[in-house]
Image (cartoon, grey):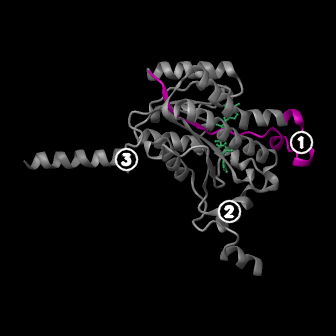
Amino acid sequence: MRFCSLHLNTYFYAQFKYHNMAYNLLQGKKGIIFGALDEKSIAWRTALKCYEEGAQLVLTNAPVALRMGEINKLSEATNAPVIGADVTNMDDLKKLFEDATAHFGGKIDFILHSIGMSLNVRKGKSYTELDYGFNQKTLDISAMSLHRVLRTAWDMDALNEWGSVVALTYIAAQRVFPHYSEMADAKALLESVARSFGYHYAIKKKVRINTVSQSPTRTTAGSGVKGFDGFMNYAEKMSPMGNASSDDCANYCVSLFSDLTRMVTMQNLFHDGGFSFMGVTQEVLNEMEK
Ligand code: NAI
């Protein structure tokens, strides 16, 4: 008897530890996660949470990013295959969706688009001296790629009814943050694609498409923005709840992939500790009065 209760206790403890506050919100769902570069990536954190919530995953990134090899750790942790795809290449995307649906043995329930790259920022070109060749690539990688992904899924009818697509964005789409440069335009375009395609996909298959506008977060892409520390500290002081972490962002994405948010579509959803609706906080006022 005593052995039995001890055994049971161990069992429950193991279950509790394994689930780590999970709610099984994505039990039975299948998703593709774009953009996990290393463990700081928002996509990486989201993949872990989706897995904890019971989802089956396929991970994907650009072939050049896969060469870093980091993603293999995530692949092991989430029991998910890695399929390379440059998001600006329609053949790569077609193959990705073919392989993913073959792996799942069925259609896909959710997609995370967590991709951003500014060639002009990378090459140190400011907003007033953009190279338009670079600019086209930036818009293609960071914004039209969402259209490319959706178009591929649409043509192949690869998404299930009530599917959910989330793309990550930043408030520079609405307000000026000088050093965010051409990425501000890319994010504005990305949010517009989410709305426009959201209309068509809602009608065709009740698929919802939203963007999540995240606080500044210390990742490879984030830290590429000039003056990032100042940027991050300012947002921290201007947000009544402080900056939202990548793990919090992952939780929010899980809720958007779950069945609890079925009627939310074509929205840009701020996930920023209140930053977007603040005028000024006492903390910032104190700084100004010094
Ligand atoms: P990250 O650097 O970890 O992720 C960016 C990803 O884009 C990388 O995995 C990279 O390999 C991928 N990528 C670039 N070119 C690609 C291509 N041609 N094909 C396929 N994938 C490609 O950085 P982070 O911060 O996790 O970025 C994820 C998303 O979150 C981006 O859209 C970013 O703009 C957005 N975001 C980030 C914020 C931050 O402060 N870090 C704030 C708000 C939004």
**Residue at numbered disc 2:** 235
Highlighted range, magenta: 106-134
The spot of residue 135 in percent (x, y) is 84, 37
**Badge 3, how many Cα within 10 Å: few under 14, some, many 20+?**
few
Name the spot of residue 86 as percent of width and height, x first. 68, 26
175 to 253, vertically: above or below? below
- Amino acid type of disc 3? Tyr
**Is disc 3 placed on a helix, strand or loop?**
loop
User: What is the C-alpha distance between the residues marked 1 and 3?
Assistant: 47 Å
Please state which amino acid type lies under the numbered disc 1: Leu
Say which residue label 3 marks.
23
SS for dot 2: helix
Q: Residues within 10 Å of mark 1 (few under 14, many from 20)?
A: some
Q: Is residue 234 above or below residue 215?
A: below
- Residue positioned 38% across, 47% down in the render: 22
The front one of 137 and 158 is 158
Residue 284 falls inside the magenta stretch: no
Q: Quick one: label 3 or label 2, which is nearer the N terminus?
A: 3
Expressed as whole percent of the image width and height from the top left, the position of residue 162 reads 48, 35
Q: Earlier in the sequence, mark 1 or mark 3?
A: 3
Is residue 110 in the magenta section?
A: yes
**On residue 130, which mark appears?**
1
Indicate yes or no: mark 2 CB to ligand 1 under 8 Å. Answer: no
Sequence order check: which comes first, mark 1 or mark 2?
A: 1
